[in-house]
Image: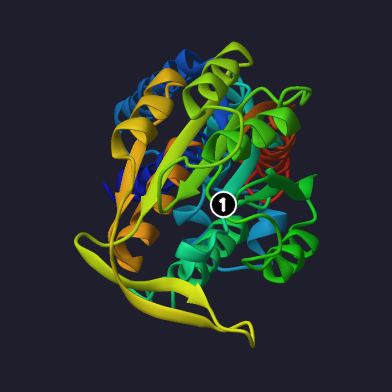
Amino acid sequence: MRDRASASVLIVLALAGVAATAFMLWKGYELELPKALWSLLVLPLIAALYLWRIRRRGGEVKLPTLSVLSKGPVDVLARLRHLPFAVALLGLGVLLASLARPQSKDKWQDVTKEGIDIIIAMDFSASMLAKDFKPDRLTAARNVAMRFIDDRPNDRIGLVVYEGEAFTQCPLTTDHKVLQDLFLQAKSGLITGGTAVGTGLATAINRLRDSDGKSKVVILLTDGVNNAGTIQPIDAAQIAKQFGIRVYTIGVGSRGKALSPVAIYPNGSYKYDYVEVQIDDDMLKQVAELTDGHYYRAVNERKLVDIYAEIDKLEKTRVKVTEHSRRNEQYFPFVLAGSSLLLLAFLLDRTLFRTMP
C-alpha cells in the first residue's frame, strides 16, 4: 500500500509538471500544431497502467543493489524507487508537448504619415481690428490659427493675407516656426484698404494648384463682404473645385453692433465707433458648398477655437501603417529538456535505483 502511495505521489507530480509545461506553451507561445497537445492524454493511461502493474505485484518490492544500500538509508531509496519512471513520464510529456511546435513572433510596424497642404487665407482689413473679440478680431483669429498650426506638425501650411488686394505672406512649408514668425509680422493696413475676398481666395488657390499633395485645403476667414478686387468669390470657388481644393469659410464677428475703426487720425491711430456687423453669410456658405467644404460663423473667440478644432478633426493626416511579423521556432529547448529528462531517468534506473533480479 505504501509503495503504491509513493508511486502515485511521484506520478501526480510528474503529470502536474507536464500540465504546467503545456499551459506555458499555450499561453506564452504561438503553436503551429496546437492539436498535438492532445497526445498528452496518453500519459495518464501510461501512469494508470504502471500503477496497475504495481498493484498486481501485490506490494512486491525490488530493493536496490547491496552496494547501493550500504551507502544510504534503505527506507528512503525504497520510497523513491519509482522516481525514474516519474522522471521519464515528465520527459516524455515535455517531448510530446514540443510536437505542437511553439513559436515566438516578432512584430514591428512601418508608419508613414502623409500630410495635408493647407493655405490659411486671412482678412487683414481694418475692420478686423474691431473690439468684439479680445483684444480684437485680428489678434484673436491669429492666435487661434497659430495653435491650429502647432497641432498639425506633418502638414505643409502657408499663409495668404488680403485687404483690398492679396499677397502670399508665407508659401507652403513644413517649417512652422518660420510660418508663425511671418504670421506675427503681418499687420493690417500694409496694402490697399477694402476686403477682396475673391482675390484672397484666388491667391490661395494659386498656391495650391501645383501642389502634389493628395489633399488640398483653404481656410478662408473674413469679417465682412467682398467689396474690392476684380475676382468674385464664387468664380474663385469654381476654380478651386476644378483643382480639387476644399474651402472652409469662417465669418468672424459678433451679431449686432461692434466697436470698430471708422477713421484714421493723422498720427496713424484709429478712431473707433459702434458699427453694424455685416458678414456675407450667403456668399461664404455658397463658396464652401461648391468645394465640399463647410461654412462656420464665429461670434466669439471660444466659438472660433471650436471651429478650428472641428476642421482639425475633419482634415486628418493620413497615416499608413504596414505591419511586419517574423516567427521563430522555439521547440528545440523543449526537445532538449525532454531528452535530458529521459536520459536522467535511464541513468537513475541503471545506477542509484538499479534493482536486484
Say which quarter of the image contains residue 193.
bottom right
* Image position of 237 with respect to 203: above or below: above
Q: Residue at x 36, y 49 (%)?
A: 9
Binning the other alpha carbons within 10 Å of mark 1 as few (below 14), some (14 to 19) or many (20 upward) gives many
Q: Residue at x 43, y 36 (%)?
A: 314
Give 315 or 349, whichever is nearer the viewer: 315
* The residue positioned farthest toward the bottom in the image shown: 267
> What element does badge 1 sit on?
strand
* Image position of 261 with respect to 6: above or below: below
Q: Which residue is mark 1?
A: 122
Colour style of the rendered protein structure: rainbow
* Image position of 40 with respect to 356: above or below: above
Disc count in the image?
1
Can you see residue 268? Answer: yes
| Callout 1 amino acid | Met
Image side of residue 60 versus residue 170, left or right: left
Residue 18: percent from the left, percent from the top? 47, 38
Residue 332: percent from the left, percent from the top? 75, 31
Give 114 or 242, whichever is nearer the viewer: 242
Q: Residue at x 47, y 21 (%)?
A: 291
Say which quarter of the image contains residue 326.
top right
Quadrant for the C terminus, please. Answer: top right
* The residue positioned farthest toward the left in the image shown: 256
Residue 315: percent from the left, percent from the top? 50, 36
Give 49 or 58, whichever is nearer the viewer: 49
Q: Residue at x 23, y 66 (%)?
A: 257
* The residue positioned farthest toward the front in the image shown: 266
Residue 139: percent from the left, percent from the top? 52, 72
Image side of residue 222 versus residue 298, left or right: right
Give 74 or 343, whichever is nearer the viewer: 343
